[in-house]
Each structure stands twice: as structure tokens, then as C-alpha cells.
Image (cartoon, rainbow, N blue to C red):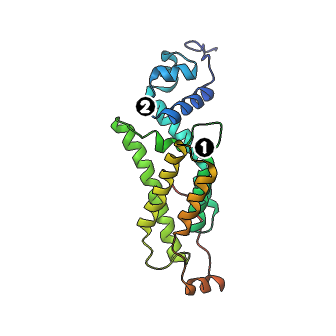
């Protein structure tokens, strides 16, 4: 039995259109990117957009998910592959300096810049929740760093996580303002210099072969 396909076949490449939408939201933010802007850059009609992606907010949600798994995936790799909190967050900041300023896409971080002047509560809350989840993963990793001897006892994990998050958000905005990769790499370097050093006793324990901190993903 032959089943006929209902409706006309899609006349555009969905992944290409999604990438074009990503560039638009990344450059202009959620609120100021209109459906007309999206259909123009995606090269499709409004009915095609609604049929393939749903409304503007649903499209943006897919853009954010795709961004997190592609452009933004370096953060999870750093947290998975680096053995300590210091190394993981240091790598995250250094690689952010590269991503935020490289050619081929808008500057900065989509999930940070897209939230600027956002007045749609659902979108604003979803982006805030992602940023808070990242801060929580920073804090958890730092706490494990203290337990493993990478950081001194008494380190305020919450404050250090929020400091690192503030540096990351500031780097994104400075990239939007024209900072170079070298400028942001220097910011990352100075930020990591401000981290507390392990005590001599902790350093000796690690030198004697104490097991290093177990890597883990960010969970966001």
C-alpha cells in the first residue's frame, strides 16, 4: 500500500535556516529580532517559518539548544577534560576569548547578549535559568577543588563562581564593544591570577601522589 505524503515538500534546508536564525538572534538579541527579520535572513515565508519551527519563541528555544551543543559546547568539554576546577574554568575563559572575537559569527555569547532588553518573561527566565545553572556547576566544581586540595580551605565557592561568571559576562560585552582576542585573553589571565592558591601543605600532599580531582561535566 502506498502512503501519499500530505502537503507540499519543504522547499528549504531546515538546518541552514536554523543557522541563519541563530546568526540573527546572536547579532540583534531576542526582542529586537522580528519575524520579518527572521523570514528575510532565513529566506522563507512566515507560513513556512511557523510550519517548520513554530512561533518566534519556539524557534529561539531551538536556536539556544543548538547553540549550546555547537558554538557553546567548549564549556562542557573544558569541565569534562580538565582535572581541576582551576584548569577547567581557566580554559573556559581562555576559549571564550577566542569564540567571542572570532570571525564568521556575531561577537560575544548569544545566551548573554540575547537577553539584553528582553521583555518577554518566558525567554528572559529561560536564559536566566541557563546562566544560573552554569554558575551552579562552577560552584560545585570549585567545592570539589577545595576538597581535592586544588584550592585552600575556606575558599568561598559561591563567591568565586559568581566572580568567574561575572568575568565571562563582561568578556562577552567587551567583545561586542570591539575588544580583541588578545584583550580578552589578558582579562582571562588576570581573572585566574586572582584565584586563591593552594596552601603549601596542600601542594605537598598533591606532590606525594594524592588523587587529583575527578573531572565532571557542567550539567548545563
Q: Mark 1 points at which residue?
A: 71
Q: Name the secondary structure under disc 1.
A: helix
Q: Is residue 156 visible?
A: yes
Report the front residue among 157 and 166: 166
Q: Where is residue 206 in the image (x, y as percent from the top left)?
A: 62, 82
Pair 2/1: label in front: 1
The quarter in which the N terminus is drawn is top right
**Residue found 47% across the figure and 19% down from its top:** 36
Q: Position of residue 187 (x, y in %)?
A: 56, 58
Q: Position of residue 44 (x, y in %)?
A: 55, 17
The disc label shown at residue 92, or none: none
> CA separation, marks 2 and 1?
20 Å
Report the front residue among 104 and 180: 180
> Mark 2 near mark 1, Cβ–Cβ under 8 Å?
no
Q: Name the residue under label 2.
A: 57
In-image side of 172 versus 125 (left or right): right
Q: Which of marks 2 and 1 is nearer the N terminus?
A: 2
Q: Where is residue 8 in the image (x, y as percent from the top left)?
A: 58, 12
In-image side of 82 versus 158 (left or right): right
Q: Is residue 205 above or below residue 99?
A: below
Report which quarter residue 34 is drawn in: top left
Report the front residue among 133 and 92: 92
Q: Name the secondary structure under disc 2.
A: helix
**Residue found 61% across the figure and 47% down from its top:** 99
Q: In this view, does 41 lie above or below 72?
A: above
Q: Check disc 1: other Cα within 10 Å, few if <14, some if 14-19, many if 20+.
A: few
**Residue found 44% across the figure and 69% down from its top:** 157
In-image side of 202 versus 56 (left or right): right
**Residue found 61% across the figure and 37% down from its top:** 105
Amino acid at each position: 500500500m502506498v502512503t501519499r505524503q500530505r502537503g507540499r515538500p519543504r522547499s528549504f534546508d531546515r538546518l541552514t535556516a536554523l543557522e541563519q536564525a541563530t546568526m540573527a538572534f546572536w547579532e540583534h538579541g531576542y526582542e529586537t529580532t522580528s519575524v520579518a527579520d527572521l523570514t528575510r535572513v532565513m529566506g522563507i515565508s512566515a507560513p513556512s517559518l511557523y510550519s517548520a519551527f513554530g512561533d518566534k519563541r519556539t524557534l529561539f528555544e531551538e536556536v539556544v539548544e543548538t547553540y549550546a551543543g555547537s558554538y557553546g559546547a567548549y564549556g562542557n568539554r573544558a569541565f569534562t577534560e580538565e582535572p581541576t576546577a582551576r584548569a577547567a574554568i581557566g580554559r573556559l575563559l581562555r576559549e571564550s576569548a577566542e569564540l567571542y572575537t572570532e570571525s564568521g559569527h556575531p561577537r560575544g555569547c548569544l545566551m548573554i547578549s540575547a537577553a539584553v532588553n528582553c521583555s518577554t518573561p518566558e525567554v528572559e527566565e529561560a536564559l536566566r535559568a541557563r546562566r544560573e545553572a552554569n554558575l551552579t556547576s562552577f560552584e560545585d566544581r570549585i567545592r570539589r577543588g577545595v576538597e581535592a586540595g586544588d584550592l585552600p580551605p575556606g575558599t568561598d565557592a559561591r563567591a568565586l563562581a559568581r566572580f568567574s561568571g561575572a568575568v565571562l559576562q563582561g568578556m562577552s560585552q567587551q567583545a561586542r564593544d570591539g575588544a580583541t582576542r588578545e584583550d580578552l585573553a589578558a582579562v582571562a589571565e588576570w581573572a585566574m591570577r586572582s584565584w586563591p592558591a593552594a596552601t603549601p601543605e596542600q601542594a605537598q600532599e598533591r606532590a606525594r601522589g594524592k588523587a587529583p580531582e575527578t573531572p565532571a561535566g557542567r550539567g548545563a
